[in-house]
Image (spheres, grey):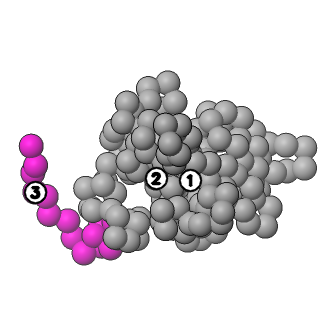
């Protein structure tokens, strides 16, 4: 069932700032921010088997994406239609003013839950595979600023996720 809601210009602008251009709708941004239908590693989406996979003959292999930036290194794979499962990561987890409140909340939750643990050198390491509601949420948390995950995450050939 679909319902209509009215939001003021400020709320709409905030939704636009959190959206992935040409991908998100206001509803998909709200679902991501509210955590509606965000799957955990213990409850995978049955449809994710084909998502983010490359097929060669009869074999299917999940594509692993990489994000590299100064002081940051991570790998992830797609889950479901929009999600991203981070497999490994090291980052200084710095936070710049452009990081949205929703991504700050994700970052805070991951630190509180022990998904990121501090290393002796002051950087953080991912302690377990961790799901993100979108590629942009994962890249934004790592980079400490809002980012377009479809441009930041790249496959082994260096092609951005969004080019696939």
Residue drawn at (13%, 58%) of the image: 5
Residue nearer the viewer, 138 or 53: 53
Residue 124 located left or right of residue 46: right
Can residue 152 be seen by looking at this rendering? no
Residue 134: assigned label: 2
Residue 158 located left or right of residue 72: left
Residue drawn at (37%, 30%) of the image: 46
Vertical side of 107 occupied by 11: above or below? below
Q: Nearer the viewer, mark 1 or mark 3?
A: 1
Q: Tell which circle, 1 or 3, labels the residue nearer the N-terminal end.
A: 3
Q: CA distance from mark 2 to mark 1?
A: 7 Å
Q: CA distance from mark 2 to mark 3?
A: 24 Å
Q: Secondary structure at mark 1?
A: helix
| Residue 51 occupies quadrant | top left
User: Where residue 40 sits in the image (x, y, percent)?
Assistant: 47, 32
Q: Tell which circle, 2 or 3, labels the residue nearer the N-terminal end.
A: 3
Give the magenta-colored segment's residue range. Answer: 1-15
Residue 28 lies in the magenta stretch: no
């Amino acid at each position: 069932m679909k319902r209509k809601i009215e939001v003021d210009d400020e709320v709409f602008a905030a939704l636009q700032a959190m959206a992935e251009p040409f991908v998100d709708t206001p509803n998909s941004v709200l679902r991501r921010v509210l955590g509606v239908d965000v799957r955990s590693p213990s409850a995978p989406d049955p449809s994710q088997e084909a998502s983010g996979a490359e097929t060669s003959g009869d074999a299917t292999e999940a594509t692993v994406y990489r994000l590299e930036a100064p002081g940051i290194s991570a790998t992830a794979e797609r889950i479901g239609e929009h999600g991203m499962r981070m497999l490994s990561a090291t980052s200084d987890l710095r936070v710049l003013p452009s990081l949205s409140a929703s991504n700050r909340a994700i970052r805070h939750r991951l630190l509180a839950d022990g998904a990121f643990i501090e290393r002796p050198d002051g950087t953080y390491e991912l302690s377990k595979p961790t799901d993100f509601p979108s590629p942009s949420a994962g890249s934004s948390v790592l980079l400490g600023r809002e980012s377009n995950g479809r441009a930041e995450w790249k496959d082994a050939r260096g092609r951005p996720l969004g080019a696939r």
